[in-house]
Image (tube, coloured by chain):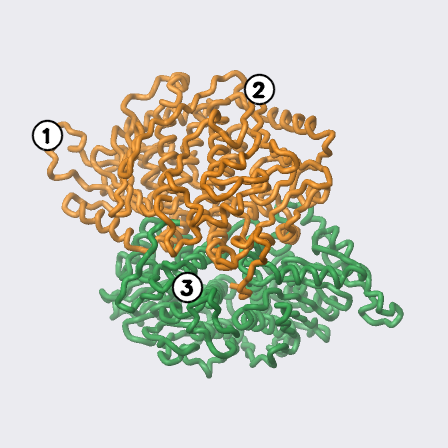
Chain colours: A orange, B green
């Protein structure tokens, strides 16, 4: 949030003054404690009331803002990479009688619309990450709800595989957003209640209108939690359940973790650089030019050697840099509406690294598995990013395998047919060879989108022949005409039209309504089946965006603004 | 739209003065001509520029407003019931060089937010109805696009099974909403482009940003249309295609249609009555009390006799009345946010009628098939209605089979345990018997929701045991305790708590944010899988609602308001 809120986007009192930073580490946590004890880790939420990211609100009752969630995201990531021994993660509260009160309401009430939406997107991704750890990493999350969990607090529990609620006649789970604030739960609550926990729709409806929530046996009966445990048996039962969940895991007992060392990042108002990724911010054009470097060297001979390289291992390093850049730009550069991706390097080396990761993950190596799923999650972040994505494929680029996913994630791609005329073909310069793209094995399997399909499957949804024809050419370097014929890129201009076509595409994009682009992209990027994750991002979030933007919530007399003032909201009663 | 637009819902210049009426018939059409010629019917769109429903705009270039679409809906319905001989329906334009320019932009720009959303909902339902006729009625729709089809014009074509575009170097199909108006296509366009026609996502993206659209061979190559036909061969090819589509149908060649005679409807500001349905409008409570009467008599002995009863046949009559009431209330009574359903009559008679319809439809009777699918579509209308639905099951009611679907569609249901104490048990009065509900065969098959599941399957999504236990009790009259135990109703209060519980439920509902209720219900009503239809109503419409509501579209400087003024829109460039 670099600019003051405009008239269109009030209220805006809670926009932070500086740039939001996503890099954090456990020694700097203000809100969480991460304790590892053999196969069981415990994440204790103990929010510092005075630790809000933006002045103007106190984080009472373990309520959270983006800063609290950035730490949670960091912890979830580190558990996967730095703690191969951890097989179960208990999320619990360090405060008496309250598990978590959800997103801070004063923060929400004072935040501009775009901030709220971006905040919800990130918290959703973190909770999806918790489910991904449970599903794909053998780190099963357990919510030990040792006090009331309301709103986002209950939604955090919903992201866990098993929910235990303390049975003390006062603790309850609730989704009070509708009755108290006139909005929807913003972190997947409704979808998980109906589609994950299979709470019957009429009970779910009733539950979501009861501000005080449901506790004890009824919460179990209605499937809102898995068990209600009396206080005297609490600690013992939590430990028992955690041990049971840990026992289901196949994570290695004695492996060494990989430290997620601080990212080398420098930045000013026009340029953000990492080791392998660079972003030029063009404020006049409303555009970011992102360049990703392929690996300089051949991959290590084995995954064990790769693990020794640790955070410097190219696939991990480049993924972390992309991840951080996406989060940074989404949060801090909301007016740069188009991201243009380029790559530089040797496609063969990218494919060789991919191969090492893929074969090692397939044969059960935990580290390779983590790298692969991290890349998957990072690419999914791109899919739900409300920016126009354009891939530009030029000579010297390495859109192959994992990096080709950037082009497949893009809304459009351009590949140069032939070479630039100015380049002397006899220099041996890599630019003297035509640009190619190369499909690798990694493109046809593990890097699924949130709809459960690969980007390639989604691209050819309903066109099986097209999919077959394209995948038959795996590992072949495809020049522009071939790539276009196979439907793998959008346009293949030659040198004469190149600059003009790309200029028109980006300028045109910058001239359109940013909101309409967001809606268009959110629809076209996800053909085919829907999953809980696409429902959360596509259906639930869209409704939430709308409600957040309505005067009944965000207007001066709306429920969100009036909460806690002692005044009741005034609603326009028309149903829309 | 009974009240003037409030500050919250501006702009509102185009709200009609009177009540919108959905009852129409071909002799009164102003915008369409319906010509039947044996197995092929032709629907010619020839919009009367001066025939807008609301003053303030002209319906130029075959653009449409709600009034135009009400006639289209009527025609689609009548083709199914009144024309069993029609097997293919050609939609074409009566104007030179233009097929249809879509929803009228001045109308949209001047309409209040709620009006736009309700308008899109109805037009979506009509296009879904066109697809339903193609899929389930043997009436296949063919779009004969004899001029440019832009926006909603192309979306109308997209609802047809086969799209022919005239190849004359000027006619094109387009979705210019994003580049010209800063909104999304509102009638399923994006979803049908990607999920029905399988246009590749990057081509779809490009197409949807080109105001002038795509025509000729490229439109075929990109799958936007099925064929491009030169003008000299146009008439002949259209006739040929229509004949081919008609040949696929199994509709009877020589059956007599059933006339959809005018509905007997009376109404004032507090009461709307039909033969079998009555709605009391309680403006103070913000509530409509809807009462549905079961059949008075036993069903006719055969479906042939039923067809002789024509529009008076109870299942058809009650469905038509419900359909009209839903449309009327949605459009004209936006401040009545809760609909409470009651029924009165003999459950056995309802089940007997259901049985006749169901067995006849299953053995191929066209009329029974139409009645069944019409009931299905009408119940689907209820599912996507942005009103809270409550079913109240009292002694003397007949929530059985088809009418039980009203309770299953409701967000909550209440069934009285026992009888009202004031009723003398010895009178033989039907009220002296406890209320029951009864599942029939009709509840476990044909009446699917737009997610492809029955309401019962959706209710028990993820709870197979619950589904088995409930369906095992088919045809059994279930009193409140049993129904509650089986999860078929929400609450079973007795006489002592009855009035209080229902009063609290409805009063509470009236106190909540109408927008948040809309979002909550749109999410909880559709557990489980998604289809094109749920995507259109849940994902696409939610994004469209949001965009419609944003200053970038609807603000004084927004694209929708500025279109045609010669001034460019001014956008807040922040991406959300």
Q: Chain of mark 2?
A: A
Give the alpha-carbon distance from disc 2 to disc 1, as whole Å: 60 Å
Element assignment for label 3 = loop
Give the alpha-carbon distance from disc 3 to disc 1, as whole Å: 56 Å
Q: State which quadrant residue B51 falls in.
A: bottom left
**Figure check: B362 above or below B295:** above
Give the alpha-carbon distance from disc 3 to disc 2, as whole Å: 61 Å
Out of B253 and B279, give the one closest to the viewer: B279
- On the image, the x and y values in percent for residue A462 come to 40, 49
Out of A214 and A472, give the one closest to the viewer: A214
Q: Chain of mark 3?
A: B
Numbered tag placed on residue A38 in the rendering: 2
Badge 3 is on which residue? Answer: B160
Q: State which quadrant residue A516 falls in.
A: bottom left
Asked whether residue B457 is in view, the answer is no
* Image position of B79 (left or right of A423): right
The answer to whether marks 3 and 1 mark residues whose Cβ atoms lie closer than 8 Å is no
Asked whether residue A417 is in view, the answer is yes
**Figure check: A229 above or below B506:** above
Closer to the observer: label 3 or label 2? Answer: 2
- On the image, the x and y values in percent for residue A99 come to 61, 37
* Pointer 1 local density, CA inside 10 Å: few below 14, some 14–19, many at least 20: few
* Image position of A121 (left or right of A162): left
Badge 1 is on which residue? Answer: A426
**Residue pushed farthest bottom?**
B27
- On the image, the x and y values in percent for residue A469 come to 33, 41
**Figure check: B519 above or below A408:** below
Of mark 2 and mark 1, the one earlier in the sequence is: 2
């Amino acid at each position: 949030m670099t600019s003051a809120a405009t008239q269109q986007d009030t209220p805006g009192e809670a926009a932070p003054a500086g740039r939001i930073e996503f890099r954090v580490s456990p020694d700097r946590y203000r809100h969480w404690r991460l304790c590892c004890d053999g196969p069981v880790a415990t994440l204790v939420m103990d929010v510092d009331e005075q630790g809000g990211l933006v002045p103007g609100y106190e984080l009472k009752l373990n309520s959270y803002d983006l800063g609290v969630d950035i730490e949670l995201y960091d912890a979830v990531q580190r558990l996967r990479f730095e703690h191969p021994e951890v097989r179960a993660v208990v999320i619990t509260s360090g405060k008496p009688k309250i598990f978590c009160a959800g997103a801070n309401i004063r923060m929400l009430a004072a935040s501009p619309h775009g901030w709220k939406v971006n905040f919800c997107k990130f918290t959703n991704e973190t909770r999806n990450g918790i489910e991904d750890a449970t599903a794909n990493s053998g780190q099963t999350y357990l919510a030990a709800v040792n006090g009331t969990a309301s709103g986002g607090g209950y939604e955090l529990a919903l992201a866990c595989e098993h929910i235990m609620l303390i049975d003390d006649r006062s603790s309850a789970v609730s989704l009070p957003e509708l009755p108290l604030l006139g909005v929807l739960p913003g972190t997947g609550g409704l979808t998980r209640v109906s589609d994950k926990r299979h709470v019957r729709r009429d009970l779910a409806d009733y539950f979501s209108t009861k501000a005080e929530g449901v506790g004890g046996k009824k919460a179990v009966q209605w499937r809102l939690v898995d068990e209600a445990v009396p206080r005297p048996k609490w600690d013992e039962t939590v430990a028992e359940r955690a041990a049971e969940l840990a026992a289901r895991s196949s994570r290695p007992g004695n492996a060494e973790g990989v430290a997620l060392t601080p990212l080398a990042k420098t930045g000013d108002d026009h340029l953000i650089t990492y080791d392998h990724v660079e972003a030029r911010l063009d404020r006049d054009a409303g555009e970011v030019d992102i360049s990703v470097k392929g690996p300089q060297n051949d991959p290590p001979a084995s995954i064990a050697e790769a693990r020794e390289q640790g955070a410097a291992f190219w696939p991990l390093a480049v993924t972390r840099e992309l991840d951080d850049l996406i989060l940074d730009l989404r949060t801090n550069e909301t007016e740069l509406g188009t991201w243009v991706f380029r790559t530089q390097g040797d496609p063969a080396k990218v494919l060789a690294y991919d191969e090492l990761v893929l074969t090692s993950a397939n044969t059960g190596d935990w580290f390779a598995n983590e790298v692969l799923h991290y890349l998957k999650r990072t690419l999914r972040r791109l899919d739900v990013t409300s920016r126009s994505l354009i891939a530009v494929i030029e000579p010297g680029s390495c859109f192959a395998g994992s990096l080709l996913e950037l082009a497949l994630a893009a809304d459009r791609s351009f590949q140069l047919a032939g070479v630039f005329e100015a380049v002397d073909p006899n220099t041996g310069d890599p630019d003297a060879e035509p640009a190619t793209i190369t499909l690798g094995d990694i493109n046809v399997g593990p890097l699924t989108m949130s709809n459960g399909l690969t980007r390639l499957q989604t691209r050819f949804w309903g066109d099986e022949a097209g999919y077959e024809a394209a995948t038959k050419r795996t590992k072949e370097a495809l020049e522009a005409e071939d790539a276009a014929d196979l439907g793998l890129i959008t346009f293949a201009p030659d040198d004469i039209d190149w600059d003009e076509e790309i200029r028109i595409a980006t300028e045109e994009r910058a001239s359109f309504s940013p909101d309409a682009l967001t809606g268009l992209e959110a629809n076209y990027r996800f053909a085919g089946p829907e999953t809980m994750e696409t429902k959360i991002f596509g259906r639930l979030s869209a409704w939430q965006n709308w409600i957040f933007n309505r005067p009944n919530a965000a207007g001066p007399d709306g429920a969100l603004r009036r909460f806690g003032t002692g005044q009741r909201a005034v609603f326009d009663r028309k149903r829309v």
